[in-house]
């Protein structure tokens, strides 16, 4: 759902199979980079004793 709404997967921008696959791979890479960035900037959880 995230790819469809935020990364333009509602419609293909290009027509050939290779170019559509490149669009999908770039969107997946963007999602992964965003997930890594969110994990790195998240504050550590407080330790419970």
Image (tube, grey):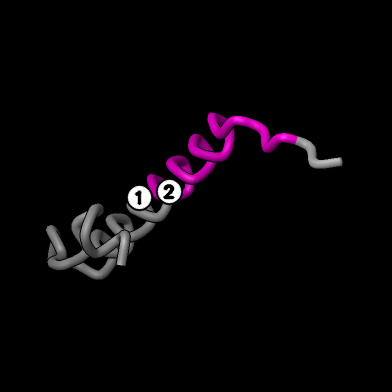
Determine whether 45 is above or below 9 in the image.
Answer: above
Secondary structure found at label 2: helix
Tell me the tag on residue 29.
2
Q: State the image quarter where residue 20 is shown.
A: bottom left
Determine whether 1 is above or below 42 in the image.
Answer: below
Find the magenta span and give its range. 30-46
Identify the main secondary structure in magenta: helix
Cα distance between the residues tagged 2 and 1: 5 Å
Of the 4 image quadrants, the one containing the N terminus is: bottom left
Residue 45, horizontal then vertical, whole percent: 68, 37
At horizontal 24% and vertical 64% (from top left) the residue drawn is: 4
> Is the Cβ of the residue at disc 2 closer than 8 Å to that at disc 1?
yes
Q: Quick check: 16 left or right of 45?
A: left
Residue 28, horizontal then vertical, whole percent: 40, 55
Determine whether 47 is above or below 27 in the image.
Answer: above
Tag 1 residue? 26
Q: Quick check: 24 left or right of 34?
A: left
Looking at the picture, tell me which residue is in the foreground, 13 or 34. Answer: 34
Residue 32, horizontal then vertical, whole percent: 48, 48
Q: Is residue 32 magenta?
A: yes
């Amino acid at each position: 759902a995230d790819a469809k709404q935020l990364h333009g997967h509602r419609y293909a921008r290009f027509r050939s199979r290779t170019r559509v696959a490149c669009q999908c791979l770039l969107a997946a890479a963007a999602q992964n980079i965003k997930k890594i960035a969110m994990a790195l900037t998240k504050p550590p959880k407080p330790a419970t004793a």
